[in-house]
Amino acid sequence: MGHTGNPMEDSRSRFGDLFGASPAPLIARAPGRVNLIGEHTDYNDGWVFPMAIDRHVWIAFAKRSDPILRVHSVAFKETREVALNDLESVRGSDWFSYVAGVAWAMASSGIDLSGIDMLVDGNVPVGSGLSSSAALEMATARALCEASGIAWHPKKMARLGQKAENEFVGVNCGVMDQMASAAAQPDCALLLDCRSLETEDVLFPEETTIVVMDTGSRRSLAASTYNDRRASCEHAVEILRSVEPEIRALRDVDRDLLESARPLMDNITFRRAVHVVEENLRPLALAKSLREGSFELAGHLMNSSHASLRDLYGVSGKELNLITDLARRHPACFGARLTGAGFGGCAVALVASEAADEFIADVHTSYTAQVDLPSEFFACSPVGGAGLVDIAAMIDTRSPITPKE
Ligand code: GLA
C-alpha cells in the first residue's frame, strides 16, 4: 500500500488491499465536536451550543450484493461482520456495536439497507470527549444512506444515532453530539434547541480561536456517573411536578420555581438542578456575545459554566480544573471550560486568534510541568457536518507541484 499524502485516499487503497475490490469514489465523513456551552442540558430538553471541528471519522465503502455488514476499523485493527437480519447478535459496547447499532436503528425505522463493506479511519481522538462515537455513527449513517440509495436527512439521522447509542450500545446520551456531527454548517457553531431540534447557525468570529486542551486523563466511571446525573435531573422534575404539573423537563423550570420546591428536595438534587436551570440560559447568551464581538463576556460565560459544572454538578476533575486555571492566567485567553460530559478528557479555551500559537506553547508547557499524562493542545476550526467527499476530484484539481529552482 502506497501513501498518497491524502489520508482519505490512503483509506481507499487500503480498502482495495483488504477487501480485494474498489471502494466507491466518494468517502463518507463526519466530524467530532467541541461544546462551547450548554453542558448537561441536552437530556433536559434544553439549549446547547456545540461546534463541529476539523477532526473527522471517514469511511471508504462499497455496496455489497448480499445483506452483510462487514467493517474494518483501522484504529482497532480488526475486521468484523454480521448479517443485516441478525444485527441484534452483536449488541454490546465495543466499536463494532456503534456501527451495527446505527444499521439496527435505521432498519428499525423502516429503512431498507443494502449490504456494505466499510473501512473506518479517522483523526478524532478516541475517548477524550470530542465525540468520536457520534462521528463514527454519523459517518456510518452517511455511508449506509449512500450505498442504499436513501436521501440524507441530518436531523433524522442524528436521532437514529442517538437511538443506536441509547438502545443498542446502552449509553444514555442526549442528542447534542449527533446533531453537531450531522447538521453543523461550515464556519459556524450550532445553536440547538434539544426539544424541537431547531437550529441556528452562528458564524464563529475570526478574531477568536477555540483551543482544545486534552488533559490526557480518562475516567473509567464516566458512564455510571453520567447516568447518575441524568437520574438526579429526572428526580428533580418529579418533585417539581408536584408543585407545577405542566413541567416536562428542567428546561421548563426557572430559578424562582426551583427555589419554591427547595424544601422538598435533598441538597444534591437541588444543586444539580440549579446547574441545569442556569446553564440552560448560557447558550443563547454566548451566541449573542459572539455575534456582537463581546469576547470578554463570552469568556466570562464559559468560566461561569465551568465553575457550575465543578461546584454544583460535580462533573469536573483535578486535571480539568488545573488546565482551565492555567489557561485563564494567559493574557490571550478570554475564558475556559471543560467540554462534553466531563470527569476527564478535554477542555476548551476561547483565545485571541493572533496569539493562539503562543497560548498553546505556554499553557501546554505549564500543564506538562505539573501533570505527567499524554496531554495534547490544538487549535480547531468550525466545519460542516457529515457529508460525502469526492476524493478523485480533490486529487485531480490539486495544483501541479512546481519543481524548486
Ligand atoms: C456527552 C453526551 C451528550 C451531552 C454531554 C454533556 O457528550 O453524549 O449528549 O449530554 O455529554 O453535555
Image (cartoon, grey):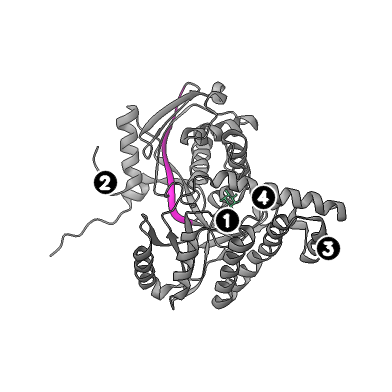
Q: Nearer the viewer, mark 1 or mark 4?
A: 1
- N-terminal-most mark, 3 or 2: 2
Number of residues whose C-alpha sits closer than 10 Å to that of mark 1, classed few (under 14), some (14–19) or many (20 or more):
many
CA gap, disc 3 and disc 1: 26 Å
Point out the stretch of residues depicted in magenta. Answer: 53-65
Residue 342 locus on image (x, y percent): 54, 55
Please check the rendered image and state whether residue 54 is part of the magenta-colored stretch, yes or no. yes
The response on whether ligand 1 sits within 8 Å of label 4 is yes
- N-terminal-most mark, 4 or 2: 2
- N-terminal-most mark, 2 or 1: 2
Please check the rendered image and state whether residue 82 is part of the magenta-colored stretch, yes or no. no
Q: Secondary structure at mark 3?
A: helix
Q: Which mark is residue 43?
A: 4
Q: Secondary structure at mark 4?
A: helix
The answer to whether the residue labelled 3 contacts the one labelled 2, judged by CB atoms less than 8 Å apart, is no
Question: At x 33% / y 46%, what residue is drawn?
Answer: 7
